[in-house]
Image (cartoon, rainbow, N blue to C red):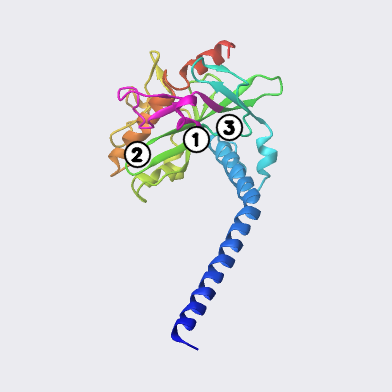
Amino acid sequence: MSKNDGIRKTLLVAFSLCIVCSVVVSTAAVLLKPAQEANKTLDRKRNILAAAGMLQEGASIEEQFAQIQTRVVDLRTGRFTDAVDPASYEPVKAAKDPSRSMNLSQQEDIAGIGRREDYALVYLVESASGDWEKVILPVRGYGLWSTLYGFIALESDANTVAGLGFYEHGETPGLGGEVDNPRWKSQWPGKQVYRGGEVELALAKGSVDAGSPDARWRVDGLSGATLTSRGVTQLVHFWLGEQGYEPFLNNLKAGEA
């Protein structure tokens, strides 16, 4: 056998192996996609429940989530809409589409998201009588190294925080990554969002002085993570402000959403 024949056979075997491996990987990806999507949906529900302080470890996520209603809000009007299907709508993806989002000016874009989607998904906890008790709102904004994605939950006055949690970010462990620390997150319930009609809730520079007149609107800053702390404050101000959910929350309180 000539040297060229040996090279051709080696290349043929390598090519065949590449084809077989590609088919196996592609087939596995297709077969696993439904399970991956189901896990993604379950994880989102878990994070929504956790942000609202409603998660019971060990209990069925689906059963717990049954008390939460998913609705679509038109952020341009602050009212509920049926314009998109909440089961398939992806707000972050829509924000990248100029036909389904609005461009934010540098002054408006304090959260560093670039564009804001026209429609948002919100999650309502309703009582047996049909009155809403909590609303859970998706939020996102840029920190130091990454965009933080999470949920903030408000009580029925649309002003008192029920909880906050982030489910995805790339902040520095031990510094900005302390947004995942249960002790830090435990400070949020009971804090107030608005004062004098403006978003006042913010992270403090350092620890909050319990005797301060601003204490109701302040959460401890993240030690050694000034830019992440600023990012959390800015995303809260954006999403609970007039470019975010504030018009919707006003309508919800007035029974006009």
Kind of residue at badge 2: Gly
Residue at position x 47%, y 30% in the image: 97
**Residue that label 2 marks:** 143
- Mark 1–mark 2 distance (CA, rounded to whole Å): 20 Å
Kind of residue at badge 1: Lys
Quadrant assignment, res 148: top left
Residue 189 percent across, percent down from the top left = 48, 31
* Label 3 secondary element: loop
Residue 93 badge: 1
How many residues crowd around disc 2 within 10 Å: few (fewer than 14), some, or many (20 or more)?
A: many
Position of 32 with respect to 13 (left or right) is: right
**Residue that label 3 marks:** 89
Q: Is residue 203 above or below residue 174?
A: above
Q: Is residue 145 magenta?
A: no
How many residues crowd around disc 3 within 10 Å: few (fewer than 14), some, or many (20 or more)?
A: some
* Label 1 secondary element: helix
- Which marked residue is nearer to the observer: mark 1 or mark 2? 1
In which quadrant will I find the C terminus? top right
- Mark 3–mark 1 distance (CA, rounded to whole Å): 9 Å
- Asked if the residues shown at circle 1 and circle 2 are in contact, with their CB atoms under 8 angstroms apart, the answer is no
Q: Earlier in the sequence, mark 3 or mark 2?
A: 3
Residue segment shown in magenta: 93-121
